Image (cartoon, helix red, strand yellow):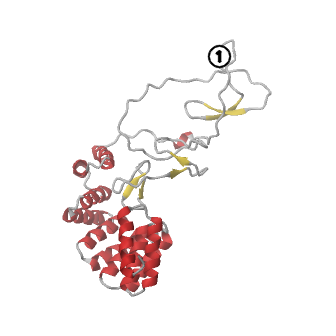
Amino acid sequence: MQQTFLCPRCNNISFLGQRFCGYCDLGFIYTCQECGSQIDPGFNYCGNCGASVDWIVQLPPVQQMEQVPYTAAVVEPTPEPVEQFWTRQGTYRDGPVVEAPGPEPVEQPEQVPFIAAIEESVPEPVQKGPAEVHQEKSFALLKEGHYTLAIEELSKAIHYDPGKAIVYLLRGGVYYKNGDLDLAFLDLSKAIELDPDLAAAFYNRGSVYYYREQFDRAIDDFTKAILIDGGDAGAYHNRGCAYMMIGEYGNAIADINKSIELDRNDPRVYQSRGTAYMKSGQMELAAEDFEKVLAMSPERTLKEKAEELLKELGYG
């Protein structure tokens, strides 16, 4: 089954092995769970320690090379200390160092650190159904920014398997990305109907309510997302913004503070808190947050807005 996670920038669902978020184009960095080294999504093993990476990479099909059977040469055991080695079939054995057949010895390649694979843990190949095939095609299209074609593939996936909440969530996210709020709302509501514990569906539907200026309903959906996943910094930030829009600045600042506690590296959140401080008359605190935005943000538009607000406060 494809493993998923939420993009830390836009909170949309992404899949292990993606290089970039299909919604906001944030680049992902993966680290080895064994040694902490950075892993390129194109590799199935850690380049530092050799640990197997348990993900399904969404790549276009490529022609597989013909597998050549391999059998290790057998030599008579000796009383020398045994060393560990790999066969090409991935099995792990203890035995003497094996030399290649023939009269002349072959120099062994330099050994690279590795972690032994557990043969029983390798799943048997599973025949994918048509719904999964169309869903996977949509991932590649989303990565390239082909949203209309991705919607077509997700619609085909729903046709073959109308009971998967995740597909409605994905298609609803693409509709939202395209500005089709009504269609996004319908798909996200269907995802919630199929899976009431899907935090991302409440989060995204809350965003639809927000842009419809239905702020009370947006707050309700962001609250449900937080109840399911209390570690979601984005849900606290968005709920804080919704509170700010209805004039509840105390609640807005409390939520944004919680968002910053969970993720201190997003300059947009400091911009929002600075705005809440400014609207509530706390001008010095507002200016401090806008200064943080200028120091942190690589985005020109965000920095320009912070500079504009600082000038309005008399700090420009």
Q: Which residue is mark 1?
A: 101
Position of residue 152 relative to residue 302, above or below, is: above
The residue closer to the viewer here, 125 or 34, is 34
Position of residue 250 relative to residue 79, above or below, is: below
The residue closer to the viewer here, 192 or 32, is 32
Q: In the image, 145: left or right of 298?
A: left
Q: Which quarter of the rendered picture does the C terminus lie within?
A: bottom left
Q: Which of the 4 image quarters holds residue 266?
A: bottom left
Q: Which of the 4 image quarters holds residue 9?
A: bottom left
Q: Residue furthest top?
A: 103
Q: Label 1 amino acid? A: Pro
Residue 233: percent from left, percent from top: 44, 69
Q: Secondary structure at mark 1?
A: loop
Q: In the image, 98: left or right of 229?
A: right
Residue 283: percent from left, percent from top: 42, 84
Residue 258: percent from left, percent from top: 46, 76
Q: Specify whether residue 222 is in view.
A: yes
Q: Specify whether residue 259 is in view.
A: no
